[in-house]
Amino acid sequence: MEPVLRDVVEYLESRGVRVIGIDYKEVLAKLHEKYGISHSLLSRFTSSIIVGAIAGLMGLDEESLRAGLLYRFGERRRRLVDPNVYVASIVADAVSSKYGHALRLEESRLGYDELMVVSGNDAVAIGKVVGGLRFQSYYPITPAQDESFFLEEYERLEDGDRQLGSVVVFQTEDEIAAIASAIGASLAGARAATATSGPGFDLMVEGLSWAGMNEAPVVITFYQRGGPSTGLPTRGSQSDLFAALFSGHGEFPRVVITSGDHEEALRDAVEAFNVAERYQVPVIHLLDKFLANSIATIRSPTPAAWS
């Protein structure tokens, strides 16, 4: 072990951290031998070593690993699943045999029959669909874009064999076009929304004023991030409340809804449409990057679970 690395390991162990050693080169050599993957590409499989170590400590079986990796890679990259499962399984077996299932998951004690593991972006997107969304416009911006990407992936609405229609997800040339197209869809009778972050919201302000003047029931999902200007796209912030409350020339009614966790985000996404339609005003749904990108387990939005 290199001296610097040894010092780090000794320091961690002195702080009570259990350090698990994994020989990356040995694992990747086995992968090369079994699948003939070129040496220049082996480094792409190192993340599966970490996945395998976690799976071993948590007691996840190979079937669970395969399902998770297939979900991550998708059908178009299915060929990558087997070699990644192979790497993860080698490490999982080695770690579990040496350390046991130190982090094994217990059965859920939440008492809910149906659960979802979602990010804040996912929760808002699901809430919008539950709330009747039929038109979503956006211009890609961190951290709002993942919500629209989720809607693009699941834009067809089905209930068993029944086709319930679809959500039109429209990527525009800029944020001005995004708010304008969402307003147009709302005035045409569709439940419509757009999603953005601070710099994009700045560009939407004239459209927001127009929506207020014309009583357009449009929803703007506003994900806060570090600013000002382009600011810190990968850092969170909660500094745009006044922008949401007071932006726009002149005075006009609006509603601002803020969410504190994933369940609130889903519920508030539904409520935003109800409020906008009932009072014929623009509604701003305010969240932040921490909530958008963090993962949580919440109840599925079924009538039984949410009653």
Image: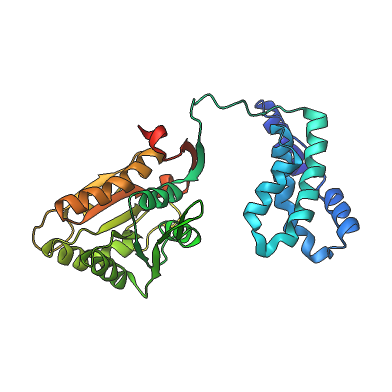
Q: Residue 47's x, y, as percent?
A: 70, 51
203 in relation to 115, above or below: below
Query: Colour scheme of this structure image?
Result: rainbow
Quarter of the N terminus within the rendering: top right
Q: Residue 186's x, y, as percent?
A: 24, 63
293 in relation to 105, above or below: below
Q: Residue 268's x, y, as percent?
A: 31, 44
- Can residue 240 be seen here? no
Q: Residue at x 34, y 48 (%)?
A: 287
Dividing the picture into quadrants, the one containing residue 261 is top left
264 horizontally vs 183: left or right: right
Residue farthest toward the front in the current orientation of the protein: 161
57 horizontally vs 191: left or right: right
235 horizontally vs 47: left or right: left
Quarter of the C terminus within the rendering: top left
Q: Between residues 235 and 29, which one lies in front from this camera angle?
A: 29
- Can residue 176 be seen here? yes
Residue farthest toward the left in the current orientation of the protein: 250
80 in relation to 298, above or below: below
Residue farthest toward the bottom in the current orientation of the protein: 173
Residue farthest toward the right in the current orientation of the protein: 33
Q: Residue 262's x, y, as percent?
A: 41, 40
Q: Residue at x 75, y 53 (%)?
A: 84
Q: Between residues 33 and 108, which one lies in front from this camera angle?
A: 108
Give the total of numbered labels. 0
111 horizontally vs 10: left or right: left
Q: Between residues 58 and 272, which one lies in front from this camera angle?
A: 272
